[in-house]
């Protein structure tokens, strides 16, 4: 299995963490990769010929198929999950920073929390189809979008880093003027 990440253009880095590719080589058996509950969301495209599978809460038995030629929104998670791909499988994706998906799409994340849902963006699906030049195409696509932020998540992250992570959700909520529930999500 190989996993490759590409950094977005500097103007997009406050909202997009990385563009990524995950490949399971043909002679390898099916393989899983943990996805951690880190506040990020992903758009995932399966350009391959076989389904991949997402178990959003690894300790539960629910498994969601990621069918070939479909684009999915993977929401924020409250526990780690596992994505499994078959031999010869390929997934391409975009990992958004906390609040980044909303800033670029203006769509709430709530329906996709702890799961995935099909995402109807045919233009993006077409752009994510090929490995070569993925980052360049994604930078051009997202560079054209109007950025709207409900919450200033980059500023909130800066507060957390400044304090070395040594503050409570309530303290962060008060300093950033964002509800505790939003921060917990």
Image (tube, helix red, strand yellow):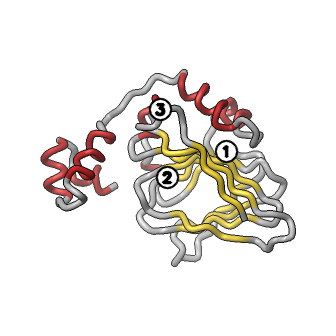
The local secondary structure at tag 1 comes to strand
Q: Point out which mark residue 18 bears.
A: none
Q: Nearer the viewer, mark 3 or mark 1?
A: 3
Mark 3 packing: few (<14 Cα in 10 Å), some, or many (20+)?
few
Closest to the observer, 4 or 128: 4
Rendered location of residue 166, percent (x, y)? 19, 61
Q: Quadrant of the C terminus?
A: bottom left
Residue matched to label 3 = 10
Q: Nearer the viewer, mark 2 or mark 3?
A: 3
In this view, 12 is above or below 73:
above
Q: Label 2 belongs to which residue?
A: 75
Q: Is 93 in front, or is 58?
A: 93
The answer to which quarter of the image holds residue 3 is bottom right
Q: Are circles 2 and 3 on residues that touch, CB within 8 Å?
A: no
Residue sitting nearer the eye, 88 or 11: 11
Distance from the alpha carbon under mark 1 to that under mark 2: 13 Å
The residue at 53%/67% (across/down) is 81
Secondary structure at badge 3 equals helix
Residue furthest right as drawn: 27
Q: Residues within 10 Å of mark 1 (few under 14, many from 20)?
A: many
Which badge, 2 or 3, is on the more N-terminal residue? 3
Q: Quadrant of residue 152?
A: top left
Which disc number belongs to residue 71? 1
Identified at 53% across, 32% down, the residue is 9
Q: Nearer the viewer, residue 166 or 51?
A: 166
Q: As displayed, is residue 167 above or below residue 98?
A: below
> In the picture provided, is 125 more to the left or to the right than 60?
right
Residue drawn 53% across and 47% down? 95
Query: Which image quarter is the N terminus in?
Result: bottom right
* Inter-mark Cα distance, 2 to 3: 24 Å
């Amino acid at each position: 299995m190989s996993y490759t990440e590409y950094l977005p253009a500097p103007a997009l880095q406050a909202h997009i963490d990385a563009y990524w590719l995950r490949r399971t080589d043909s002679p390898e058996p099916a393989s899983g990769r943990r996805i951690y509950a880190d506040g990020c969301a992903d758009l995932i495209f399966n350009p391959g010929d076989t389904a991949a599978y997402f178990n959003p809460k690894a300790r539960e038995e629910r498994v969601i198929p990621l069918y070939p030629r479909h684009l999915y929104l993977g929401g924020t998670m409250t526990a780690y999950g596992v994505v499994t791909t078959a031999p010869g499988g390929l997934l391409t994706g975009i990992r958004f920073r906390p609040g980044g998906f909303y800033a670029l799409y203006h769509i709430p994340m709530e329906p996709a929390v702890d799961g995935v849902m099909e995402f109807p963006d045919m233009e993006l699906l077409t752009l994510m189809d090929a490995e070569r030049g993925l980052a360049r195409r994604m930078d051009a696509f997202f560079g054209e979008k109007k950025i709207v932020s409900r919450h200033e998540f980059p500023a909130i992250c800066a507060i957390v880093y400044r304090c070395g992570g040594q503050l409570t959700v309530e303290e962060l909520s008060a300093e950033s003027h964002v509800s505790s529930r939003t921060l917990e999500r």
